Amino acid sequence: MSVTLRDSKPLLRFLTGFFLFLIAIIASALFASKPGMIIKAFLKWTEVLVLALLVFLYIRNLQTFKTIYWVLFISMFGYSIISLYWLISGRLVEYGFRLPGGYDSLFALSMVIPFIKKKSGKFILIGLLVIAVIFFSFSRGAWLGLALLLAYMTKYFYGRNKKKTIISIVLILVAILAIKSESIIELVDWRLSTSFDSGNASNIERSGLIRVAFNAFLSSPIFGIGALNYSTYLVNTSDLYIMRAEILETMTPHNFFLEILSELGLFGFCALLLLLYSIYSALVFPRSQSHPTVGTLYQEGLFLLYFTFLFAISLGFISGGYRFYMALLFGMALSLIRAGENG
């Protein structure tokens, strides 16, 4: 169980941030309408901590790092495969013409981008598959995340060969325009037109949820209204007329950071920032020093996943699957500060 570290600061920050975050969850019970939810939240986040530390202890060399890396990728890409099967089998209509798993596919894409940049055929194919799922998810956030990742790749290839990059982009655009499907065009037009429509029911609901979250924060700015108590606060608010969802017990502000600010207050929010900074510092550490264990492709993939994940939760919330992703991501990031070991 002995562990040799090249720099202990990221790990100490991580443990300090996480323990403060768990303390913030407990402290949020002071103003919680449903104190019982505090226990549920505490257990959920303890699970993330334990799994992250187990991954950190398990990874000792490149082989073990690769194992966890591809386990995480497969868990995301598997969602894409299932969604594609629904699309091919004609079950798209059952989901309102929107495939689930848009963000999961976005995470998978971020992990294989370094390998796509090396022009690996199988990873280019995987990239095209997950891009298809992201497109047919018709998720505004997933589309924006996809645009950012594609811009990242385009910048890389443009720096390598400007002429080929421009020609490739033109050919892709021509191919897209050549595909004539009235149903797809109508869906795209509908998605784009409703995205910025202030009168759209979904947009009204989201803006209302954000307003309720700010009110919740102002009502208890230090310790919050209680972990997992946002939906209870929402039910007791006067803004229910803006809600279009039938089940309010699972509603969140659709912004994880704002959710933490409202439920755990400034105490929990600052602990979260310290926790996330510790992971960032672990990820950037190998960039200034030659890492004896992990290859640069995997470092870049993990770095892209980290920022893609932060982007996704800024537009959503932490579900069960996301906690699994987070734990493995945290464990792998912390493993970058370990000294190389054999065996």
Image (cartoon, rainbow, N blue to C red):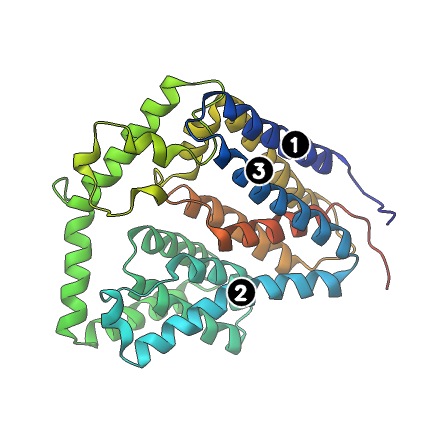
Residues at marks 1 and 2 touching, judged by CB atoms closer than 8 Å: no
Q: Nearer the viewer, mark 1 or mark 3?
A: 3
* Residue 75: numbered disc: 2
Q: CA distance from mark 1 to mark 3?
A: 11 Å
What residue would you read off at disc 3?
42
Helix, strand or loop at mark 3: helix
Q: Residues within 10 Å of mark 3 (few under 14, many from 20)?
A: some
Against 276, residue 338 (above or below) is below
List the residue tagged with mark 1.
19
Residue 168, given in percent of the width and then of the height, sits at 36, 70
Asked whether the residues under the numbered discs 1 and 3 touch, taking CB atoms below 8 Å apart as contact, a structural biologist would say no
User: In the drawing, does residue 336 fall left or right of residue 99?
Assistant: right
Q: Earlier in the sequence, mark 3 or mark 2?
A: 3
Q: Which of 259 and 284 lies nearest the eye of the viewer?
A: 259
Q: Please name whichever residue, 170 or 272, is drawn nearer the observer in this view of the structure.
A: 272
Alpha carbon of mark 3 to alpha carbon of mark 2: how far? 25 Å
Closer-to-camera residue (83/239): 239
Q: Is residue 267 visible?
A: yes
The answer to whether 42 is drawn above or below residue 294 in the figure is above
Say which residue appears at 69% left-offset and 42% top-offset: 285
Q: Quadrant of residue 272?
A: top right
